[in-house]
């Protein structure tokens, strides 16, 4: 059974930055799709960024391109989400997800069956 543990959420002002971490255990990390999703109150869960850990390909939602960066540390079975130039509209619960991978990173919610508990990100002045 895969276990995903997120950390790094918090409260920041607009324009600030945060780095989220997701550490996987009990999972074949070396060739997986790992992704970050977010869900704001009253809204559907949306994909933010994904990475194929076997090859490093990435995919981003248009709303975060140029501001967010997803990366991996294979030695630590950890995926990071560096979030810069944060906006109020980035406020949400952020979730890490993992599953098998077709070789191309995907941010489609239905692709993932393993989820973390989430970490809250709040951007406000």
Image (cartoon, grey):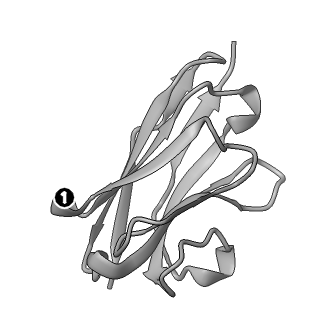
Q: In the rendering, at what x and y percent does residue 61 appear? A: 70, 54
**55, above or below 117, in the image:** below
Q: Nearer the viewer, residue 61 or 116?
A: 61
Q: Residue at x 48, y 82 (%)?
A: 103
Q: Relative to residue 24, is residue 71 drawn left or right?
A: right
Q: Relative to residue 116, is residue 77 drawn left or right?
A: left
The image quarter containing residue 73 is bottom left
Question: Which residue is disc 1 drawn over?
Answer: 76
Q: Residue at x 67, y 81 (%)?
A: 110
Name, please, the residue furthest toward the left: 75
Q: Residue at x 22, y 63 (%)?
A: 74
Q: Relative to residue 3, is residue 19 drawn left or right?
A: right
Name, please, the residue furthest toward the right: 42
- Quadrant occupied by the C terminus: top right
Q: Residue at x 66, y 74 (%)?
A: 109
* Dot 1: element: helix
Q: Relative to residue 33, is residue 67 drawn left or right?
A: right
Q: In the rendering, at what x and y percent does residue 46 appear? A: 72, 60
**85, above or below 89, in the image:** above
How many labels sit on residues?
1
Q: In the rendering, at what x and y percent does residue 1 appear? A: 32, 85
Visible residue check, residue 42: yes
Name, please, the residue furthest toward the top: 125
Visible residue check, residue 36: no
For label 1, count other residues whose C-alpha is less than 10 Å away and answer few (under 14), some (14-19) or many (20+). few
Q: In the rendering, at what x and y percent does residue 117 appear? A: 47, 60
Q: Nearer the viewer, residue 113 or 48?
A: 48
The image quarter containing residue 34 is bottom left
**45, above or below 81, in the image:** below
């Amino acid at each position: 059974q895969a276990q995903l543990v997120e950390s790094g959420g918090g409260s920041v002002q607009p324009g600030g930055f945060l780095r989220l971490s997701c550490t996987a255990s009990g999972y074949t990390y070396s060739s997986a799709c790992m992704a970050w999703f977010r869900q704001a109150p009253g809204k559907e869960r949306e994909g933010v960024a994904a990475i194929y850990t076997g090859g490093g390909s990435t995919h981003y939602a248009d709303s975060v391109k140029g501001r967010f960066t997803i990366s991996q540390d294979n030695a630590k079975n950890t995926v990071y989400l560096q979030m810069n130039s944060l906006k109020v509209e980035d406020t949400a619960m952020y979730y890490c997800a993992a599953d098998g991978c077709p070789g191309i990173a995907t941010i489609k919610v239905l692709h993932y069956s393993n989820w973390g508990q989430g970490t809250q990100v709040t951007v406000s002045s």
